[in-house]
Structures are given as C-alpha cells and as structure tokens.
Image (cartoon, helix red, strand yellow):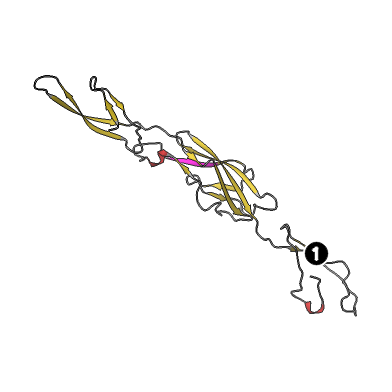
Amino acid sequence: SAFNLDSSTGQLSVKTTIDFEIKPTYSFVVRATDNGIPAKVGDCDVTVLVIDINEIPSIAATTTLSVEENSETDTLVGSSPLVHADPDNVDDPSISVYNTFIFEITSGDDDGIFTITTNGGQLKVLRANRLNFEGINKYTLGVRISDNGNLFADGVVTVNLLDVNERPSVSDCVRSVEENSNANTQLTGGACVGSDVDAGDTLSYSLVGGDDNLFNVAS
C-alpha cells in the first residue's frame, strides 16, 4: 500500500512516493474494530485523490550537433529532436492542465539563421545559404524548454559546421596576342587567375570551349 494508517487515530499518511502521472487515484477499505466481546467491525470505502502539481521540464544540459555549410531552409540540424522530458506531458488533458511545453532559442543566433520546432524540439536551418564554414564554423545556441505552468529549463547546443567543397571562381577576362605569333607565345595582360574560398585547395586550369584548339593554358 502507498499509505500508512494509524491504528489508534485512523489518520492516514503517505508511506511511499506517490506520482499523479502514474496513479492519480487510490481506493481501499478502512476497517474499524472495537474491543468488545465478541469484537465487531465496521468498514468504509476510502478514495484518495492525488493533487497534480506542475513539475519542471528538463532538457540536455549540453548537446553537440553538426550541419553542412550553405544548407537550405528546413535542413535538419541533427537527425532527431533535442533530448528532453516533462513528467507532466503524459497527463491526460482532461484531468491536468500541465501537459504542454514549448521550445525556443534564447541566445547565440543574432542573425536568425536557426529555428526550433515549438512543440517538438527539432533544430533546423531557417535562412538558406547563410552558414559559411570559412566565416563562422561553430555556433553556440542557448535553448529553453518551458511548460504552461511557467517552469523552464535551459540547455546549450553547439552546432559545428561541416565544410563542403565549393566552386572556385574565375572572372571573365580579355587578353591579346599578335597575329603570326609562334607557339608558346604568352598572351599579354597576364594570367586568368581564379580563387577558391576553401582553405588549402589548389586550382588547375584547362581550356574547355570555344577556340581552345588554338591555345594552351598553364595548368
């Protein structure tokens, strides 16, 4: 039994931890016995109603996730929602009001790049093509879970950007060369030089169209 009964006074008291979410009501019989000869008894039915109280939700204190740079809107950050719990979330709405909670990003996202599903806790990309590994390769976000009883818990999510290979760029250029020039004569105006934002990448060059059969390019 979850309760003790004082045999002298009939006072009931809690014997072990009781949890509204596990068992909101208890029913049992209390018997009174006199000391007459022969002894007589009287029984009564007792119903104990457990009063629901709002309990604080929880969220993982620290979480580390990753996402590719240049990701599009609605790209998931992490394959599943943030680890969280709310004891009241198992309550039947018909018997308890403490059964909803929401998520929000509280810090670390001044540019509004990320979003989190209000009721599910799934972190996602909100603004497309704003994640740039070469600019910022890690974000530290403050996140909060709040229930509808004004209790909340905070956590920290570290989002590491995954570097992806990006297209190099080469600007259109105009070069000149005298007619009747010999093979291997360099065109005036300098080389057509490209650039690549990916640190450590090296570029090689080739001719791929137009009058490419008339010229060579130093790779």
Asked if the magenta segment contains residue 33, the reply would be no
> Which region is colored magenta?
100-104
**Residue depicted at 70% across the width and 63% down the height:** 167
Which residue is identified by label 1? 193
**Residue depicted at 48% across the width and 47% down the height:** 120
Residue 108: quarter of image: top right
Q: Which image quarter is the N terminus in?
A: top left
**Residue depicted at 14% across the width and 19% down the height:** 35
Find residue 5 and report its horizontal and vertical position in percent.
26, 25
Q: Amino acid at mark 1?
A: Val
Q: Majority secondary structure of the magenta segment?
A: strand
Residue 205: quarter of image: bottom right
Q: Nearer the viewer, residue 214 or 50?
A: 50
Q: SS of the residue at dot 1?
A: loop
195 sits left or right of 16 in the view: right
Find residue 20 and report its horizontal and vertical position in percent.
35, 35
Q: Which image quarter is the C terminus in?
A: bottom right
Q: How many marks?
A: 1
| Residue 127, placed above or below residue 209 | above
